[in-house]
Image (cartoon, rainbow, N blue to C red):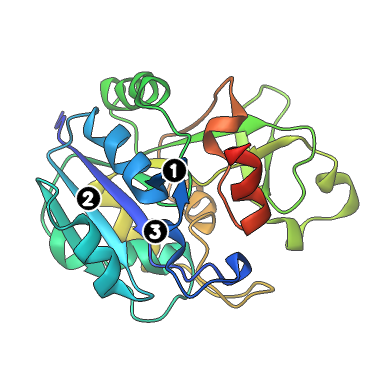
Amino acid sequence: MNKELRVIILAAGKGTRMNSDLPKVLHKLQGKTLIDYVIDESELLKPKETILVVGYKKERVIKHTESRINLKYAIQEEQLGTGHAVLQTKKLLKNKKGHMLILYGDVPNIKASTLLPVVDNHIINNRDLTLITAEIDDPTGYGRIIRDKKGNLLKIIEEKDCNNNEKKIKEWNPGIYIFKTEEVFKILDNIKTNNASKEYYLTDAIGLAQQSNMQIKAIKIANSGEVIGINTADQLKELED
């Protein structure tokens, strides 16, 4: 079993709803940029390397983070979804084994203390895919977790593709995954864009992994506040208060 861990942080988005030309991850929360919160926590996991996927005004994001140790960059020229973003790391990770943790540059409350036991569980079991889930009172806008009667993961459905009953489910998908590195690109290369946004959803990797009979587990964490991303200026202000 290969224990090597790499962290992928998705930080390519413009953040249109922030009403600013500044890349979303460079907005500040209590005097510190969103991306710095995520990188600081990820470094506590002691990964072999961290890859930042950049896109919108990438030069500014790279300049802000270039003093970091053990940080590499992958470029997402067009923002075509989370699955597409992770695919941009393929050249850097070609022929590398181990596991990758996928995080987001606009989720500043994530804690290494929460991630570490999930990562350890994933690696100890040499699982192909582990995903973090959480429950929230109002999961509007998020992908829902569909489980079977035994509690095993069946599928994840993006809200825009949910029916009315599925929208009532409170367990949601923050999009934080741990993949076995050598398996992830086999899956991502097969993702299609047959959804409402015509984007490559990373969530679609779950269904493809299941079709390939890969070992998958969904682990629910206690504090949903750690995995909620910032999408608007109002949400950022709420965290400031």
Q: Position of residue 1 (x, y in %)?
A: 16, 28
Horizontal side, residue 220 vs residue 161: left or right: left
Residue depicted at 41% across the width and 44% down the height? 31
List the single residue furthest toward the bottom. Answer: 78
Numbered disc in front, either 3 or 2: 3
* Amino acid type, label 2: Glu
Q: Nearer the viewer, residue 14 or 158?
A: 14
Question: Relative to 148, is 32 above or below?
Answer: below
Residue depicted at 45% across the width and 57% down the height? 27
Q: Nearer the viewer, residue 147 or 237?
A: 237
Look at the image and tell me whether residue 175 can be seen.
yes
Look at the image and tell me whether residue 232 can be seen.
no
Q: Which mark is residue 73?
A: none
Q: Which mark is residue 213?
A: 1
Q: Which mark is residue 26?
A: 3
Place residue 146 in its image quadrant: top right
Question: Relative to 104, is 122 above or below?
Answer: above
Q: Which mark is residue 182?
A: 2
